Image (spheres, rainbow, N blue to C red):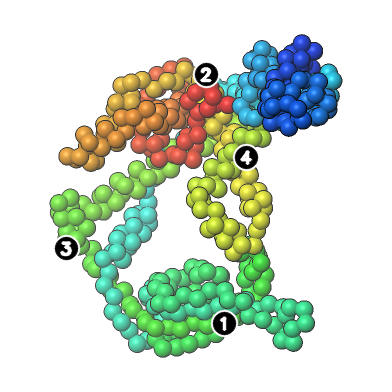
Amino acid sequence: MKVTLERLPESRVQLDIEVDDERLEKSLDSAYKRLAQKARIPGFRPGKAPRHMIERAYGREGLIREALDRLVPDVYNETIEQEDVPAIAQPELEILELEPVRFKATVAVRPTIDLGDYRSIRVERQPVEVTDEQVEETVMTLRRRFAERETVERPAAHGDVLTVDVEGVIKGQPAEGDTEETFDEPFVQDTDAEFQLKEGQDLLVPGLAEAFVGMSAGDVKTVDITIPDDFRVERFQGKPASFTLTVKLVEEEKLPEEDDELAAKVNADDFKSFADVRARIREDIEKALVEQEDTRVRNEAIDKLLEIATLDFPRVMVEREIDHMVSDAMGNDRQQYAAYLSRIGRSEEEFRETWREAAELRVRRALILGELGEKEGIDPTEADVEAELDRIAAPMGEEASRFRELFMTPDGIATIRRNLLSQQTLERLSAIVAGNGDDNTVAGATEAAATNDDLGENVPTTEEERA
């Protein structure tokens, strides 16, 4: 074979392959035998007609094209092995000539990644402070959870809980030949909807929630609102809409006092007084803020890593990521998917395009984190896996042992190893940007890292997955 190899942008390789005459002749002989079995040549039983008769019946070009069905894939596979081409997808094939047989194969290959001077990246950690306002806001949320409701006859005010019916139509233009000035397209119809009337909130569209202020049980009102330009259904954007509002019930919240009785309702075993509740609230807020700062530092570190890294990867990786994201969001029911596309007024191509930017970012992040893990020699040990299994199973109590066994499969262990690799890589990155880059010790996986799925869930673990 004669092979010309050309590297193309976006991690692709183009192979120009010419098959030698001897190889072609062997393939033609095999093609003749296959055609002879199904050919109907007068005077000959199936499979017995001589080659020149088969070639006369199908023509030499027909015989060659029959040979190509097996010849081209075989030659292509031998070529990428011979040329050490790290293909990660099926090739695009184009027949250039039949005699001699010459074809072109364009195939995506493993990405190339250069992290640059990643150890010089620094991200300053911001101090975490819990304010009294944050504590009071959480206390109020807790009191509302245990609040009682009292039906009132007065007009609705902010803070009340309403039970309502909402009917809405979009006012559209008449169809051609229609004598009506406008038509009404059903927009929303909710019955016995319950919500708390809060100042500044949006209910479906801006301005709708405020329309309920001052209405009493039994009141009916119609309001006209223009649908905003960023509304999720494109065909409704900017259209005038008419809403009919019916208030069925107005209830006032009766908040419990901040006392020991409320503490007992929250958890009598953990809290002896409401002061204990406040202390736990402050502790939980601080923990959440620390985790939030951890995430901010990691996000900023990854952004800086992306700025200095050089990546070349095939578009097919983005398409595959879009497949995953759409499947996660929409499920595998094609009928429901089609119905949803119809409802939002988009084609499948348009809908997929809305995911492209996020998919590309996920691919880029996954690639640089995978490369970072390899550069830093991060490799979860068996002890790490065992410890993670224990951590996952611990909350199951007496069922922990049985629950643990569910993960003791090749796929389960592989998943745990991927998660640990993700967590440990992110921890290593945090250490580097804090100026601890000379310490190659990877700390045990933390719960904060475990929850940071959007950064780490796609970190590949094998050479094939990294591709």
Mark whose residue sits in front, 2 or 4: 4
Give the mark nearest the N terminus, 3 or 2. 3
Instruction: Pick whichever, 104 or 413, lies toward us.
Output: 104
Give the mark nearest the N terminus, 1 or 2. 1
Residue that mark 2 sits on: 375
| Image location of residue 315, percent across then percent down | 66, 35
CA–CA distance between discs 1 and 3?
A: 44 Å
Secondary structure of the residue carrying tag 2 is helix
Label pair 2/4, CB-CB below 8 angstroms: no
Secondary structure of the residue carrying tag 4 is helix
Q: Residues within 10 Å of mark 2 (few under 14, many from 20)?
A: few
Residue that mark 1 sits on: 223
- Quadrant containing the N terminus in the rendered view: top right
Say which residue appears at 53% left-offset and 27% top-offset: 465
Residue that mark 3 sits on: 261
Q: Is residue 26 visible?
A: yes
Residue farthest to the front? 43
CA–CA distance between discs 2 and 4?
A: 27 Å
Q: Which mark is residue 319?
A: 4
Label pair 1/3, CB-CB below 8 angstroms: no
Instruction: Pick whichever, 278 or 38, lies toward us.
Output: 38
CA–CA distance between discs 1 and 2?
A: 62 Å
Query: What amino acid is found at the position of numbered circle 1 in the picture?
Result: Val
